[in-house]
Amino acid sequence: MLLEVKHLTTEFHLKKGVVNAVDDVSFSVDKGEILAIVGESGSGKSVTSLSIMGLISPPGRIAKGEILFKGNDLTRLPLHELQKIRGDQISMIFQEPMTSLNPVQRIRDQIMESIMTHMKLTKEEALRRTVEMLDLVGIPSPEARANDYPHQMSGGMRQRVMIAMALSCRPELLIADEPTTALDVTIQAQILELLYSLREKLNMAVLLITHDLGVVAEAADRVVVMYCGKILEEADVKTLFTSPMHPYTVGLLESIPRLDDERERLSMIRGMVPNPLHMPPGCAFSDRCDRCMEKCRKHMPALVPVNGSKVRCFLYSEEVEEDRHE
Amino acid sequence: MNEPLVQIKNLKKYFTVRTDFFGRPTSVLKAVDDVSFEIRRGEAFGLVGESGCGKTTIGKMLVNLYRPTSGTILFDGRDLTAMDEEERRKCCRDIQLIFQDPYASLNPRMTIGDIIAEPIRINHLLPSSEVEGRVNYLLGCVGLANHLRNRYPHEFSGGQRQRVGIARALAVQPKLIVCDEPVSALDVSIQAQVLNLLHDLKDEFGLTYLFIAHGLNVVKHISDRVGVMYLGKLMEIASKRELYEKPLNPYTQALLSAIPVTDVTRKKERIILKGDVPSPIDPGEGCRFASRCFKVFEGCDRICPPLRDVGNGHLVACRLYDTLVGSADSDSVSQ
């Protein structure tokens, strides 16, 4: 296993109380695999990725759990050790290509910075590699564009630059946090195609964080569905989309406007995500679930393996999650 | 077929980017360039396109946030562009707008009740004793409980705020509502709720929608007819069924194929467009899409095809279909 996250709990201490943004989450990413984490806003998917990168700062903290990258626990590593891994073996692309590049630095210098930090290269070699990377992500006339400032580029181009920067040290794991959300559909298709082909070429693993199930279906091998900081379902992509188990996944899939159906009304999930400070005592989805039972409101079901997938719902197993910290 | 409520003819909106010493424009951004279409009474017209295509600019001209550079907008038979300010303002009551960002479009210092009551008070639609009842009624229409009226916007989630925005638009009993990407800032499960609500309200209040969105999948459920825009030009207009089953313009085809599908069993052939959307500043002579088109041929970069009917009310602006138009003679092509 390349990355193993075990019982990760990330909490935020706010004035009004403690919020468990990520609550006892475990999953693993294999070499060369694309694992998608899907969830709506507030589901904890981004906090999960930030926890892996060690980017959680107060009032947030990792309260429990281990993040094993090639056997090393990232949560216990001293900062200088972590910095060697970050940007080199694990790198990340962010949602907003507009705000994650430095506006007063040339593209060239920004990419060279990470290359020169992690690889012992001379300036000329680093520049050559920068141009190579820009070429790899499909930027036309890379030598010339390397001298551009971010504002001279379009959103799609900037996202390509971000990808080039993230890939410049040949990472084994790429964390892509909503890489296409800020882009137009035709550009989104380009970027997804690019990620997919780079995965083949460089044999890296990708942890894809997204709210768009369409993107997941196109790109991922395996999917983790998160809701209110908990994993509700985990399955390979085919199983999830052909036979989703958890009522939340089913509802989510049905509420997507699709091109090929003739329904006048969309099916929907009623209600809204509960306030993280006032979570229901049982299953977090119980208030919105059409198949909610008596015990759903009282107990949190455990995440149990069912037919090769994992699901957290009393419809499939009677098992109650123990060790609730409240 | 119903008669048109809005007729837009040769509508243009140019923004001057740079001027010379004498203040004459030397560089012009053609946000909306010679666009004509109509919206029929009681229909939902979907307007789709990527960022920078001018779809929002059209919406803003309809609600009088922008003055058109030239062209006419006939609303209910009256020309909005020829009215004086006084008259135009009265007309605004009939055309309301729902904004994209539910976080930025509600005044954080006003209660929900006041936000919804404000347009009623400004237009003196009801005696003040009846305003409260009306607000309660509107809150009910959009699925919010009455007791929420004294709360402030920050206490609400994105979906609820968008409901408040819808109630505010409904408050003055408009004929046309311009929905500018009303669901793109919302989560998937909430999107479906708001789309369904808009669908129900349309029937209940006999509304007409101009529904602006950047994705073709979102407008599909709500629209009766759909127009596709690219860089200030309309590329194709057709009934929903025609457009999704038989897209003619290569851009529409690419846009449809770019939407990620959740059906993993069926891998579809995808058209990946090369390059980015070019800048709308000083566009060239020819078809706007020519630089990225995968069916481009001799002459596309010089000749701008007009929007023409190819039968069944299906309008398309592409030279591939010159033969379909029948009497498409070369002089009608140059525009």
Image (cartoon, helix red, strand yellow):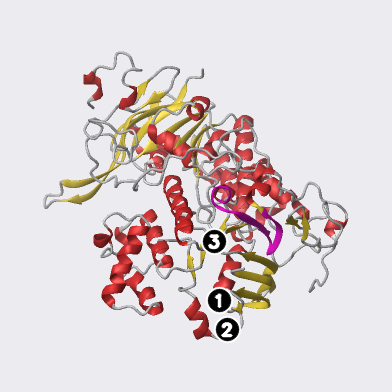
Question: Same chain for marks 3 and 1?
Answer: yes
Q: Earlier in the sequence, mark 2 or mark 3?
A: 3
Tell me where residue A176 appears, x and y as whole percent: 51, 62
Residue tagged 1: A54
Q: Residue furthest top?
A: B327
Look at label 3 and name its amino acid.
Gly
Name the residue: 69% across, 50% down. A249
Is residue B176 located in the magenta-colored stretch of the structure?
no
The answer to whether residue B253 is left or right of residue B224 is left
Q: Earlier in the sequence, mark 3 or mark 1?
A: 3
Q: Chain of mark 1?
A: A
Q: Which mark is residue A32?
A: 3
Q: Which mark is residue A77?
A: 2
CA distance separating discs 2 and 3:
24 Å
CA distance separating discs 1 and 2:
10 Å
Q: Which mark is residue A301?
A: none
Q: Is residue A24 visible?
A: yes
Tell me where residue B91 appears, x and y as whole percent: 44, 34
What segment carries the magenta color? A216-235
Do labels 1 and 2 touch, CB within 8 Å? yes
The image quadrant where one finds the N terminus of chain A is bottom right
Question: Same chain for marks 2 and 3?
Answer: yes
Q: Quadrant of residue B56?
A: top left
Name the residue: 53% across, 56% down. B103
